[in-house]
Image (cartoon, helix red, strand yellow):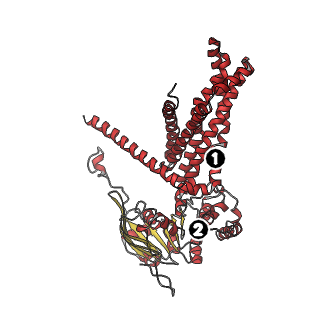
Amino acid sequence: MPQPLASSAPVVPVVRLSQAGFAYGDNAVLRGVDLTVHRGQVVAIMGSSGSGKTTLLRLIGGQLRANAGKVEVAGQDLGGLSRAALYALRRRMGMLFQFGALFTDMSVFDNVAFPLREHTDLPAALIHDLVLMKLQAVGLRGAAGLKPGELSGGMARRVALARAVALDPLLVLYDEPFAGLDPISLGITAQLIRRLNDALGAASVMVTHDVHVSLDLVDYVYFVSGGGIVAHGTPTEIRASNDPYVHQFVHAEADGPVPFHYPAPPLASLLSLPEGDVP
Amino acid sequence: MSALAGVLRKLGARVVDSVWRLGFAVRFLFAVLRYSGQSFQRLPLTIREIYFSGVLSLLIILVSGLFIGLVLGLQGYDILQRFGSSSALGTMVALSLLRELGPVVAGLLFASRAGSAVTAEIGLMKTTEQLQAMDMMAVNPIARVIAPRFWGGVISMPLLAAMFSAMGIFGGWLIGVVVIGVDNGSFWSQMQDAVDFRYDIVNGFIKSFVFGTAVSLIAVFEGYDCQPTAEGVSRAITRTVVSSALVILALDFVLTSFMFRGL
């Protein structure tokens, strides 16, 4: 389990999952997941497609409720929260969606101002200044008047990041923050995630496939496969790991514990060729 | 036998699915009504939707109303003059529009123009995770997005139907009095005499209000419930237009049979 960063304050994990499980009907997606995230940490959840990592992120965000075990955020069990209490908790969370999910009928400025206008009674002049500061932090103050349709993918992701941290959240969730970005935008986004997390003293949880950028960025990694945590550790431990799954994932090997072939009957049984002629 | 069983199974599954969707739609309506208070506290949101659903539909409503009125004038005169009653043209045009054509045709046009746009907008917001983002920001999408669009439609529709009828009467007058030469005084005085405020105008208003509520509910529900894919949004838009048309025509029959049963 990741250790909290050195601090004199009492250690209360921002996120704690204890034996958490989730199923769609009879189809179990997650089983017996234990995970802890402390303040100041950036934690990555990695795994192949369909392994259940996005479901895990949704459990933490309260978009889905665990069928088994416990999911706690800021010491509150999400399972027992009313909608109003969940919304009160979400005011202390930010989330970056895979493609930004910016409101297309609003300008960049209004997108970032949205949570401030919805949840605070701050005067318009103060909201104006705060939004410009957030946009300055992500390098897009000059784009305040643009519409989301006028932004590149990387810029949209940065605006969404500014919006996600508009209320200085305790916890920021990232769903595939690097997907589809060019190397420059990817590097900028990675830097911003680290810098903003450290500046806010928040906790960050990101679901990602990008091994190398993530291992340079995060404090701790969880690998999800088959609905459970199969490996976890610091980036150094992960790089040195002999676990076959971690090895396959980190070194991008085509075959291994995650098979190249989708389960199917033997090819020979489906082709009308003599046995031995089929590889 | 097994083929028949398969057909019956599919039919049963479709019926069960439809009942589930109907139940979900009713629950959805209650949720919209429940959060409407929050929505009305921020009136500019609803006014903005009245602009998008109502004001931007004005052109198609006025032009269609004019043409319907012109056609009614021509057809009405052709029939009435056979019985020597061409002076009753104003009455015929006004009653046809106020009782039936105004609410029904305006409702159908409203579903095609504004209903489809609302479904597309909400469906795309769902597809691009904007509704989820709002929910994650502790902002209820039903209160912030759905309720204002629902009420925007409910408020706009009776006003559009009234303008449709007014434009249609103008079209009837244009063709009857100006082009054909029916007496202007007879046209208006017979209309004034025959049209009853409560019986014709209020009933027409009630119809347009009911149609507006039905179309708005269908439009927001289909958008909210659509599959978050390009194909899903396209299907939802089609369902909005088709369902709205059928519901308007069916409701029109039911309402007419209650309102004008003394005839």
Residue denoted by label 1: B50
Q: Amino acid at mark 2?
A: Thr
Q: Is residue A265 above or below residue A122?
A: above
Judge from the rendering whether residue B213 lies leftward or rightward of residue A146; answer left or right: left
Q: Residue at x 66, y 35 (%)?
A: B163
**Vertically, is B211 above or below B229?**
above
Question: Which chain contains the residue that carries disc 1?
Answer: B
What secondary structure is marked by label 1? helix
Left or right? Give the position of A105 relative to A212. right
Please provide percent x and percent y for residue A279.
Answer: 32, 53
Instruction: Identify whether B48 is placed above or below B195.
Output: below
Q: Looking at the rendering, in which quadrant would you find the N terminus of chain A?
A: bottom left
Q: Position of residue A262 (x, y in %)?
A: 36, 55
Q: Secondary structure at mark 2?
A: helix
Q: Quadrant of residue A130?
A: bottom right
Q: Chain of mark 2?
A: A
> Which of the 4 quarters of the picture holds residue A135?
bottom right
At label 2, counting other C-alpha atoms closer than 10 Å, the crowd grade (few under 14, some 14-19, many 20 or more) is many
Which residue corresponds to the image point at 29% horizontal and 43% vertical from the top-left? A272
Residue A147 shows in this picture: yes
Q: Which residue is under mark 2? A: A189
Mark 1: amino acid: Ile
